[in-house]
Image: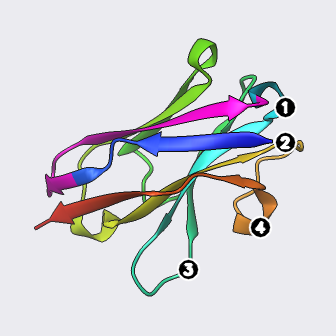
Amino acid sequence: QVQLVESGGGLVQAGGSLRLSCAASGRPFSTYAMGWFLQAPGKEREFVTALRWNGGDTYYADSVKGRFTLSRDNAKNTVYLQMNSLKPEDTAVYYCAARSSPGLPISVREYGYWGQGTQVTVSS
């Protein structure tokens, strides 16, 4: 089992920045990919970004390209989501996700491990 713990959410004005962290524990060596999804009020959870734990491609949703950056610290089993130029429409609960099988899908059901979520609110 892999446990994911997120931190770093909060309230920020439009144009500002936040950095989210997601620490993996349990059996992180079995993790193939990690990423982030968001869920806005009344909407379905949707893909934001993901990367392969051992290197390679990082994928971003079109809505965040050029503004968000996903990185990892292998020694700390942690991924970081740097969010810049935030917009009110970025307001959502952000969930860290991980999968232990090859592939880098964008579908929620393809990820077997989830964090508890962290709220990001961007005021206009």
Quadrant of the snapshot with the N terminus: top right
Circle 1 packing at 10 Å, graded few (<14), some (14-19), many (20+), is some
Q: Nearer the viewer, residue 6 or 72?
A: 6
Q: Secondary structure at mark 1?
A: helix
**Residue bearing the label numbered 3:** 44
x, y percentage for residue 29? 80, 25
Please say if the residues under marks 3 and 4 sit with CB atoms less than 8 Å apart.
Answer: no
x, y percentage for residue 50? 63, 45
**Residue bearing the label numbered 1:** 30
User: Which quadrant of the structure image shows residue 66?
Assistant: top left
Circle 2 packing at 10 Å, graded few (<14), some (14-19), many (20+), is many
Name the residue located 42 percent from the left edge and 54 percent from the top edge: 64
**Residue bearing the label numbered 2:** 100
Circle 4 packing at 10 Å, graded few (<14), some (14-19), many (20+), is few
Q: Secondary structure at mark 2?
A: loop
**Compared to 96, does 106 lie above or below?**
below
Labels 3 and 2: the sequence-earlier one: 3
Q: Nearer the viewer, residue 25 or 62?
A: 25
Mark 3 is on which residue type?
Glu
Give the Cα distance between marks 4 and 1. 18 Å
x, y percentage for residue 47? 59, 61
Name the residue located 61 percent from the left edge and 12 percent from the top edge: 75
**Compared to 32, does 77 lie above or below?**
above
The disc label shown at residue 109, or none: 4
Name the residue located 84 percent from the left edge and 46 percent from the top edge: 103
**Compared to 94, does 77 lie above or below?**
above
Q: Nearer the viewer, residue 57 or 123?
A: 123
Please say if the residues under marks 2 and 1 sit with CB atoms less than 8 Å apart.
Answer: yes
Labels 3 and 1: the sequence-earlier one: 1
Q: Which residues are magenta?
A: 11-27
Residue 30 seen in render: yes
